Image (cartoon, rainbow, N blue to C red):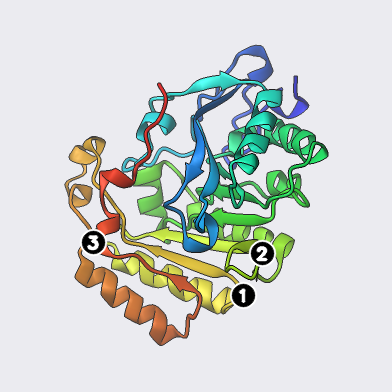
Amino acid sequence: MYTELGACRLCPRECGANRNAGETGFCKASDKIKIARAALHMWEEPCISGENGSGTVFFSHCTMKCVYCQNYRLSAENKGYEITEDELSDIFLNLQNQGAHNINLVTPTHYVPQIIKALKSAKKRGLIIPIVYNTSGWERIETLKTLEGLIDIYMPDMKYFSDARAQKYSSARGYFQIASRAVEEMTRQTGKCVFDENGIMKKGVIVRHLMLPGMMSETRKIMEYLYKSYGNIIYVSLMSQYTPMPQVERFPELNRRLSMTQYNAMVEYCAELGMENVYIQDGEAASESFIPPFCE
């Protein structure tokens, strides 16, 4: 039983659900950890996946509800299976033994107390590879502060600049203000990016931005903000991999691929701004083959 789950305020919604007593809030997570996949993952940024892969744990449920989510079966349909903190700790060590460059926690916010316990246990038993916190960017500062010293690499999204779009597509009012404060806290904790001799990140922040069709203005404003705020202290991943999923049919403006002409224009814009640390993708990244198989 965790005090933090008695009136849950782990994410910015601060819904107050008593998860210890079986209540669930917006994210629908109980007090039990639920995951859908734990395996080496080859399709992250090169400094994260490297040659061996990132030791990725996909957590079920989500504090956001993005209508276009490629992991919709986890975030909205809540697929997966329950595990204990001890089992999660064992998973971390098994992934390390498989040669993972890091432990990659995907959509972890609603399980932070349990993850902290599992990480501390695993570290006592020999976990030494970096820990990646892979998040939507929808984070409460107080929750992030509990992770200081345990997380080596933060990999947040910065999805929207417009509050109207954040509310319409992700039910996340105030998203940009919340995500920008979160990135500030993450950068404070990690400092300047550090890499090993093989180019694998050991410490730092990578902000991801998935370009959405017809929303170049969102991307432009976000890139301007990131460069003005952080220069080349952090890395940015400008993603072209948007794949229309079945659930976006009711949003015709999203039910199409991203124009590569628009994407390439934004790559050029980043260069014009002076951004040096930007990961880019080619059109082949926009494919359902890049969506890993999940457990029921």
C-alpha distance separating marks 1 and 2: 9 Å
Horizontal side of residue 73 vs 263, given as left or right? right
Image coordinates of residue 250 in percent, x first then y, are 19, 38
Residue 281 percent location from the top left of the image: 34, 65
In the figure, 88 relative to 98: above or below?
above
Which of pointers 2 and 3 indicates the residue nearer the eye?
2
Residue contact at pointers 1 and 2, CB within 8 angstroms: yes
Q: Earlier in the sequence, mark 1 or mark 2?
A: 2
Which element type, helix, strand or loop, lies under badge 1?
loop
**Up/down of 59 relative to 202, above or below:** above
Residue name at image x 42 percent, y 54 percent: 163
Q: Amino acid at mark 1?
A: Ile
The correct choice, above or below, for 86 with respect to 218 in the image is: above
- Judged left or right of residue 20, residue 160 is left
Q: Which residue is mark 1?
A: 233
| Residue appearing at x 61%, y 50% in the figure | 102
Residue 169 appears in the rendering: yes
Secondary structure under tag 2 reads helix
Task: Please name the residue that numbered disc 3 is placed on.
Answer: 214
Residue nearer the viewer, 236 or 172? 236
Residue 123 occupies quadrant: top right
Tell me if label 1 and label 3 are in contact, CB under 8 Å: no
Q: Which residue is mark 2?
A: 187
Which amino acid, by three-letter code, is at mark 2? Answer: Thr
Q: Residue 220 — which label?
A: none
Q: Amino acid at mark 3?
A: Gly
Q: Name the foreground residue: 195 vs 254.
A: 195
Q: Is residue 26 visible to us here? A: no
Looking at the image, tell me whether mark 1 or mark 3 is earlier in sequence order: 3
The answer to which quarter of the image holds residue 161 is: bottom left
Query: Residue at horizontal 62%, vertical 23%?
Result: 17
